[in-house]
Image: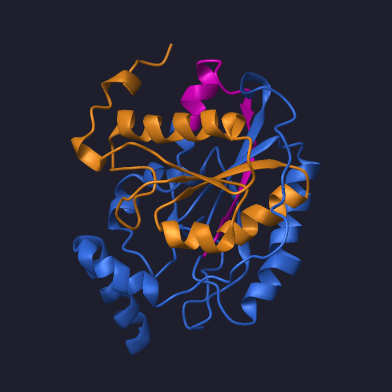
């Protein structure tokens, strides 16, 4: 995934990737990465857990704009289902 | 289904259920290390005006599209262009290297289209591209060159033509 990300960024489009295997991101060095120590097949969370999915998506997009060093990997502080995601559980306006 | 596909699917299921086994599973695949400068551009417009496309290696696609090749041990470097407006009405996932039963129940966990549509409706994100791109991960051997010299270059050009400002990438 990181190899594709590097090609897209090289074409002039800013990118951020979600990683669940930190070693892959360390090897491939994509421009920007958020890391979650979460199970395979669940990079954005659990089925139908809207607040948890929102947390991952919104933090990823925020960091796409905030990271200012190429190759940065940010470890997101979300402990799978033990984390309190209520801050992201706002109804759509 | 061939024995090797069955074995890959079983290993993927075990690695998902028992995280201690995941390390062993990931150690069996080593991505090509990068050298030299890391590509880098700033987002051209603020988030509330940006057009976003998703790119995934989770193997999701429309059922009428050709499945990814799961017989080749080096993976399949091709991609499927997917229509974000109708993908979740009827989708399939071709990928033996992770267990996608949960993604089958709610594909947002690998391809968060609904969450992104909410952000657009709330005015936080400018817009979503109509077309997104799906790969099958686990690319190895000679297919790595095909990926980085041909197929990834093709989708990058298509994203540029579609005036996409930012891309979010998700694995399987």
Residue B167 drawn at (x, y percent): 62, 41
Q: Quadrant of residue A88?
A: top left
Q: Can you say which quadrant of the picture contains the C terminus of chain B?
A: bottom left
Q: Nearer the viewer, residue B74 or A36?
A: A36
Q: Which residues are magenta?
A: B116-136
B111 up-or-down from B46: above or below: below
B140 up-or-down from B87: above or below: below
Residue B30 is covered by the magenta coloring: no
Q: Nearer the viewer, residue A9 or A77?
A: A77
The residue positioned 33% from the left and 36% from the top of the image is A77
Left or right, A22 with respect to B18, comes to right
Colouring: by chain
The residue positioned 75% from the left and 68% from the top of the image is B149
Q: Nearer the viewer, residue B61 or B90?
A: B61
Say whether residue B172 is visible. no
- Colour of chain B in the rendered structure image: blue
Residue A72 drawn at (x, y percent): 55, 45
Residue A69 drawn at (x, y percent): 63, 40
Q: Can you say which quadrant of the picture contains the N terminus of chain B?
A: bottom left
The residue positioned 67% from the left and 27% from the top of the image is B50
Left or right, A37 with respect to B69, comes to left
């Amino acid at each position: 995934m990181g190899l594709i990300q590097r090609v897209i960024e090289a074409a002039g489009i800013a990118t951020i990737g979600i990683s669940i295997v930190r070693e892959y991101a360390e090897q491939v060095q994509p421009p920007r990465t958020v890391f979650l120590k979460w199970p395979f097949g669940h990079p954005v969370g659990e089925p139908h857990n809207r607040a948890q999915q929102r947390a991952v998506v919104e933090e990823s997009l925020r960091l796409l704009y905030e990271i200012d060093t190429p190759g940065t990997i940010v470890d997101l502080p979300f402990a799978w289902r033990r984390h309190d995601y209520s801050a992201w559980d706002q109804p759509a306006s | 289904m061939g024995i090797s596909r069955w074995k890959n699917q079983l290993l993927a299921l075990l690695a998902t259920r028992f995280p201690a086994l995941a390390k062993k599973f990931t150690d069996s695949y080593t991505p090509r290390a990068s050298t030299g400068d890391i590509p880098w551009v700033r987002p051209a417009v603020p988030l509330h005006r940006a057009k976003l496309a998703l790119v995934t290696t989770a193997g999701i696609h429309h059922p009428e599209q050709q499945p990814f090749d799961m017989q080749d041990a080096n993976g399949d470097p091709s991609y499927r262009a997917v229509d974000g407006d109708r993908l979740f009405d009827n989708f399939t996932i071709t990928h033996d290297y992770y267990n996608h039963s949960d993604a089958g129940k709610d594909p947002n966990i690998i391809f968060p289209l609904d969450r992104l549509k909410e952000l657009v409706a709330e005015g936080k994100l400018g817009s979503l591209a109509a077309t997104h791109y799906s790969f099958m991960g686990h690319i190895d051997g000679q297919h790595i060159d095909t990926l980085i010299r041909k197929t990834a270059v093709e989708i990058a050009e298509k994203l540029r033509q579609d005036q996409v400002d930012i891309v979010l990438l998700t694995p399987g």
